[in-house]
Every structure is written in structure tokens, then in C-alpha cells.
Image: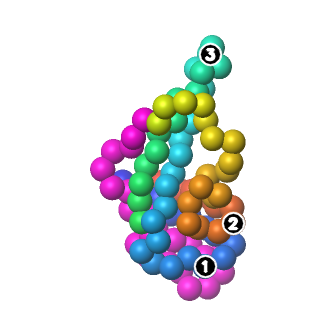
Amino acid sequence: MGARVELREPVASGTKIYLLVHFRAPDGQVTTIRFEGSIERVREHAPFEILIAFRGTGRFMPGPAPRRAVAEECDAPGGANLTEV
């Protein structure tokens, strides 16, 4: 499983990254699944497109959803547009 992401700033190949996915139930409870991956390829000019390879399956994370954005949770700078590959 992988994803292509466009960033505003370059990121080094091999950087570890986490994708947090939040699912909200009708009663308001949130389930979060964390996927760990690493940056496999980097386009060296703007937009800085990277290819992320995810390892294994996601892990369920207990507790409420984090308040910070995913881009702040990982080593990668700036916002991102994700495309599944």
C-alpha cells in the first residue's frame, strides 16, 4: 500500500511518516488508525511530490482523536494532497 503526496517543501527520502485516519461514529466517538510508512521517492522540484510506502497494517490507537493536523504529526513539513497508489 502506498500514497503519492504533494508538499510545499522538499523532504528527504527515507523519512519516517505516519498517516492518522479518524472515523467518527454516529454517537460522536472517534476511532483512530495509525499507518507507519517511509518516503521512498522524492521529486526534486516544486511541487515536491513524494511516494510513501506503508508497512503492514494500521494500528488502532485508543483515546480521543489528536487535535493536531496530520502534517504536524509526521516528519514532513507543510500541507499535503494525498493520492492512493
Give the percent coordinates (x, y) of residue 43.
Answer: 53, 80
Instruction: Name which quarter of the figure residue 38 lies in.
Output: bottom left
Q: Residue at x 66, y 81 (%)?
A: 46
The range drawn in magenta is 39-60
Give, as a three-letter code, the residue at label 3: Pro
**SS for tag 1?**
loop
Marks 2/3: CA distance?
31 Å
Give the percent coordinates (x, y) of residue 40.
Answer: 40, 72
Give, as a three-letter code, the residue at label 1: Pro
Q: Name the image quarter holding the C terminus.
A: bottom left
Of callouts 1 and 2, which one flags the residue occurring earlier in the amino acid sequence?
Answer: 1
In the rendered view, does 29 fall on the left or right side of 40? right
Looking at the image, the residue that sits furthest to the front is 63
Marks 1/2: CA distance?
10 Å
Residues tagged 1 and 2 counted as in contact (Cβ below 8 A): no
Instruction: Name which quarter of the figure residue 10 lies in.
Output: bottom right
The crowd level at tag 2 (other Cα within 10 Å; few <14, some 14-19, many 20+) is: few
- Residue 23, visible in the rendered structure: no
Q: Name the image quarter holding the N terminus.
A: bottom left
Residue 19 part of the magenta-drawn span? no
Give the percent coordinates (x, y) of residue 71.
Answer: 63, 58
The label shown at residue 10 is 1
The crowd level at tag 1 (other Cα within 10 Å; few <14, some 14-19, many 20+) is: some
Give the percent coordinates (x, y) of residue 12.
Answer: 51, 79
User: Badge 3 is on which residue?
Assistant: 26
Marks 1/3: CA distance?
39 Å
Give, as a three-letter code, the residue at label 2: Gly
Of callouts 1 and 3, which one flags the residue occurring earlier in the amino acid sequence?
Answer: 1
Residues tagged 2 and 3 counted as in contact (Cβ below 8 A): no
User: Badge 2 is on which residue?
Assistant: 78
